[in-house]
Amino acid sequence: MSKILVQKFGGTSVGDPERIKRVANRIKSYHEKGYQLVVVVSAMGHTTDELVDLAAKISTNPPKREMDMLLSTGEQVSIALLAMALHEIGVPARSFTGGQVNIVTDGNFSNARIESIDTQRLNSHLEQGHVCIVAGFQGVDQNQNITTLGRGGSDTTAVALAAALKARECEIYTDVDGVYTTDPNKVEAAHKLDQISYDEMLELASLGAGVLHSRSVEFAKKYDVVIHVKSSFNYNEGTKVVSENLIMEKLKVTGVTLKSDDARMTIGDIPDKPGIAAEIFEVLSEKRINIDVIVQSTGKDKLNTISFTLPVSSVRDAKEGLEPLIQKWGAGTISTDENIAILSAVGVGMKSHSGVAASMFKALAEQNINIEMISTSEIKISCVISQDRGKEALRLIHTVFGLDKAT
């Protein structure tokens, strides 16, 4: 088995000098056991938010290329300080930016995708016994422009490096000690899972579970990389994200989530003819806006209404793209509602168990919680509900599916 281990430490894990020193000591314990270590680090604490605020004081609409140049500096501070901390305790370490280890991406500034990684430089330093500390969240495109991978992109960096280096595992250290059945800050009865499948984790991540970045899970599934989510503040066993084939007992529902940062956009009174929906979603695709739940209905006057959910942060871009279509058709209206939440139940066991949707809908109905939209997949059921009832509904469904921890 490979001796290479990739570890990723998030912003809270390296939030101040004392925490950086604690991370260094943890790394040292692995180094002394003979592991070849590649460590991916995020920016310290709220550094990225502070840099965004700084840019806002200069420009109301800064170029994305320059934002990437600015935001990438946060990780450079972290990797340098961690390398210093390791040297201080006798561990040889080298820090590298994404560009220095040839993490090549496409040119989509602020949300770039990794295209290739050249591992030659890292392997050379690993063979010399160095701990390699790599800046997460960043790479370079074919023209040597610095790019960033979007929020949470350090997870993607770590998993991509683990895949490229054929590492034995990718450990993701966060401020929680694993993946829970739901957000423990919202539901006290939530409990930690020992393991979860890639598909379940992918659904949970895309539905708002902030433990892992969804693109990192996509990478892990594609290249069969085991992700081990752990806390940087204790040494407890965390949660392993693995292939479904390695999970013995497949629960009907593994976890529930509540996503509260989406809006519903409704395009009403539009012509009922082929190609209208294609035009709408082509515009949204060109603007790289992620759509989740979609509902279409036709009225008696042969006019369509199409509703869909999208990130609140994308509402303005969506409107700008869709208004020319309304003008072109000579018909239609656009409205938005930001007082929504998406409640979801996820589990690979749904494939072999019936009645999950019925149980969920009945429980919500009994509490007079109205379902406004529904979306399903083989392992997921999502309901759009009023944001005001979101936390109540989350606790309810968590209990309904027997996920409350034993007291």
Image: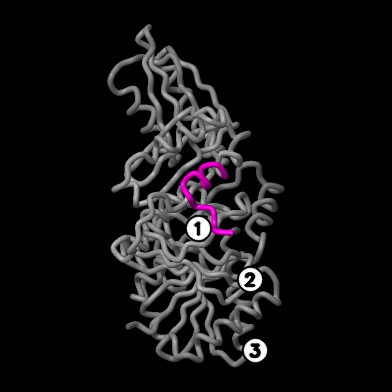
- Spatial separation of the CA atoms under disc 1 and disc 2: 20 Å
Which of the marked residues, 1 or 3, is nearer the chain's N terminus?
A: 3
Task: Bin the neighbour count of mark 2 within 10 Å (Cα to Cα): few under 14, some 14-19, many 20 and up.
Answer: many
Label 3: element kind: helix
Q: Is residue 189 magenta?
A: no
Q: Measuring 48% from the left and 57% from the top, which residue is drawn there?
A: 213
Q: Measuring 51% from the left and 38% from the top, which residue is drawn there?
A: 342
Quadrant for the C terminus, please: bottom right
Residue 131's tag is none
Which of the marked residues, 3 or 2, is nearer the chain's N terminus?
A: 2
Which residue position is annotated with label 2? 14
- Please provide percent x and percent y for residue 319: 51, 28
Range shown magenta? 395-407
Which residue position is annotated with label 1? 148
- Please provide percent x and percent y for residue 388: 63, 34
Which residue position is annotated with label 3? 88
Amino acid tagged 1 = Thr
Left/right placement of residue 324 relative to residue 248 reads right
